[in-house]
Amino acid sequence: MSKFSSSNFKDQKVLIRVDFNVPLNSKFEITDDTRMRAAIPTIKKILNDGGMVILMSHLGRPKGGPEEKYSLRPLIKHLSELLGGVTVLFANDCIGEQAYTTAGMMRPGEVLLLENLRFHPEEEKGDEDFARKLARLADVYVNDAFGTAHRAHASTAVIAKFFPVEKRMFGLLMESEVKSAEKVLHQSQRPFTAIIGGAKVSDKILIIENLLKKATDIIIGGGMAYTFMKAQGGKIGNSLCEEDRLDIARDLLKRAEEQGVCIHLPSDSIIADKFDNNANISTAPSNDIPDGWLGLDIGENARSQFANVIKRSKTILWNGPMGVFEMNNFQLGTKAVAEAVAEATQNGAFSLVGGGDSVAAVNQFGFADKVSYVSTGGGAMLEYFEGKTLPGIAAVSAL
């Protein structure tokens, strides 16, 4: 049983670092509450034990001080609803007199939401004194914000040192994120297929390099595939290409071959004469796209080629879409991959989907509950699979 699950929080004040960096519309209404919902089981466990919960989070990127549009205040009502009607108290700062007074008066079963951590520049600087002031609020520190685990900020990487080892731990969300990532990275069953998409090779070089040591197959789709195509001498028309990454693409292909890893590039593409859902559309081999046209999705052959590889896999990691899936005419590739991942999962594979666009895609196409795990951390997950130590994990794990 995990440290968190086996702890009893009766009469304890528990400071939880959550990731409530949720999108808000112009009326300050939450448009996607996935991250909030993900934190609820951790909060409820503490409340059910008879503990008190103090929540801290960032929202957006305020510039050096309080900005009304980045206040966490609009989250209070929805958070209360998610917790089944529990009253949520609010402190208009995360440190200072009001925060300390409100926290000091809390009773078991109550929840306090602190104002945006990033209203203090010290948060992103990893300032020790600021971390100490936050730590004063509670008896126990719980990090449940995988989405910020790669940041060496005061509330994620520094604060843990102000709590004894037995009083600092991961929450249920963080535990499941780490466990799922570990399962893919260190306990993967073969064949292990990594599906890497998105626009740029430069964003994914490190993850591909690290996966060359782990995966049997690497599927490359999205805009980044055309840099690989051009690196092999292909004609890619006006498709996205990072000219300064051609040598790296060639090197990755060579190293994959030497290590017996099969890299799959899309054999054909859905092409358009401009970047527009209403553009003229055609298909072409991915290495022979006419001038003036650009690849915006993988083609029919590539869809079945990729699906076959995915369906025979025992472990699947998916990070990045196959095309511009936000446009109806260029979503078939990403949808086909989602379907194949769901089918493989149903047949016993372990599948982990992470990265903002991949998560948006499985949600949009209705496959979120048909894969093994959907990660809440985009950048954090990417860095984890690049083989980096995440400060937010190291701080809590350190004895």
Image (cartoon, rainbow, N blue to C red):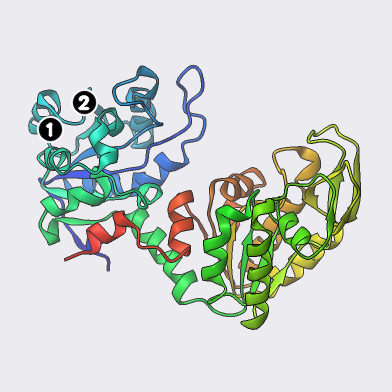
Observer able to see residue 77: yes
Measured as percent of width and height from the top left, residue 378 is found at 48, 50
| Front one among 268 and 227 | 227
Measured as percent of width and height from the top left, residue 396 is found at 23, 58
* Residue 192 figure quarter: bottom right
Give the SS element for disc 2.
loop
Residue density around tag 1, few if under 14, some if 14–19, many if 20 or more, within 10 Å: many
Residue that badge 2 annotates: 93
How many numbered badges does the structure rendering display?
Answer: 2
Give the SS element for disc 1.
helix
Q: Quadrant of the N terminus?
A: bottom left
* Residue 350 figure quarter: bottom right
Residue 377, compared with residue 255, is above or below; it is above
| Front one among 224 and 219 | 224
Q: Tell me the mark number nearer the camera, choosing from 2 and 1.
A: 2
What's the mark number on residue 154? Answer: none
Q: Disc 2 and disc 1: Cα gap in Å?
A: 12 Å
**Amino acid on which disc 1 is placed:** Ala
| Side of 302 relative to 126 (left or right) | right
**Amino acid on which disc 2 is placed:** Asp
Please name the residue shown 19% across and 41% down the image: 127
Residue that badge 1 annotates: 103
